[in-house]
Image (tube, grey):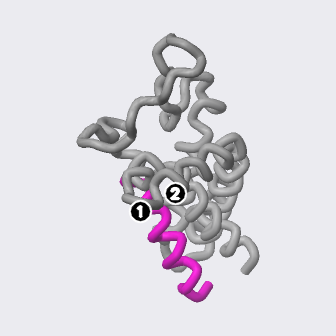
Amino acid sequence: MILALLLDLANIAGGFLLAIALLRRIPRVGDDLARFADRVAPFGWIVGIVALAMGVTYLLIHVLTGPHLFIFEIVGIGVGLALLWDRLTGRRSLTAAPHSPPGPPHSSPPPTSGTAGPTGVALLLAVFGVIAIIVGIQGLFTPD
């Protein structure tokens, strides 16, 4: 029961960290969500470890004893791998924002509103993050 709760909470928290590129574009609350995500992001690797460990645990349990695979563990493994990508491969993170161009230290950041949004891999991970949030919430209400 506790392991299932950890998997669901890791899916929700990891999904939030992955989906922040889309969530920050929500009017009125996007900036607050982005600030919260910036504060929590350094601990994303812990969420990734929990998601990966619980996902693999449930994958093994359901492969060996049945009844069948569930979406919860597959999404947990995906969230864990996405959040731990830079630690596993030694390369730049898939979710990291590109470095800002050099300029004066007190220059204002570019505006976040407008038509420019995440594209490519960032968009794919953000949509996967939204799916992970939905799967995590569904897992909270699904009996073990």
Whether residue 78 is visible to the viewer of this picture, yes or no, is no
Judging depth in this view, the residue of 36 and 122 nearest the camera is: 36
The residue carrying pointer 1 sits among few (fewer than 14), some (14 to 19) or many (20 or more) residues within 10 Å by Cα, namely some
Dot 2 or dot 1: first in sequence order is 2
Which quadrant: the N terminus? Answer: bottom right
Residue 47 horizontal side relative to residue 68, left or right? right
Which quadrant: the C terminus? Answer: bottom right
Residue 105, magenta (yes or no) = no
Judging depth in this view, the residue of 105 and 86 nearest the camera is: 105
Which mark identifies residue 142?
none
Give me the residue at 64% from left, 67% from top: 9
Extent of the magenta region: 127-144
Residue 57 horizontal side relative to residue 106, left or right? right
Whether residue 48 is visible to the viewer of this picture, yes or no, is yes
Looking at the picture, does residue 90 appear above or below residue 138? above
Q: Are dots 2 and 1 in contact, CB under 8 Å? A: yes
Single out the residue that lies furthest toward the left: 115
Residue 48 horizontal side relative to residue 102, left or right? right
The secondary structure type at the circle numbered 2 is helix
Looking at the picture, does residue 139 appear above or below residue 77? below
- Distance from the alpha carbon under mark 2 to that under mark 1: 7 Å
Give me the residue at 58% from left, 71% from top: 62
Residue pointed to by mark 1: 131
User: Percent x, y for residue 3?
Assistant: 72, 71
Give me the residue at 48% from left, 62% from top: 132
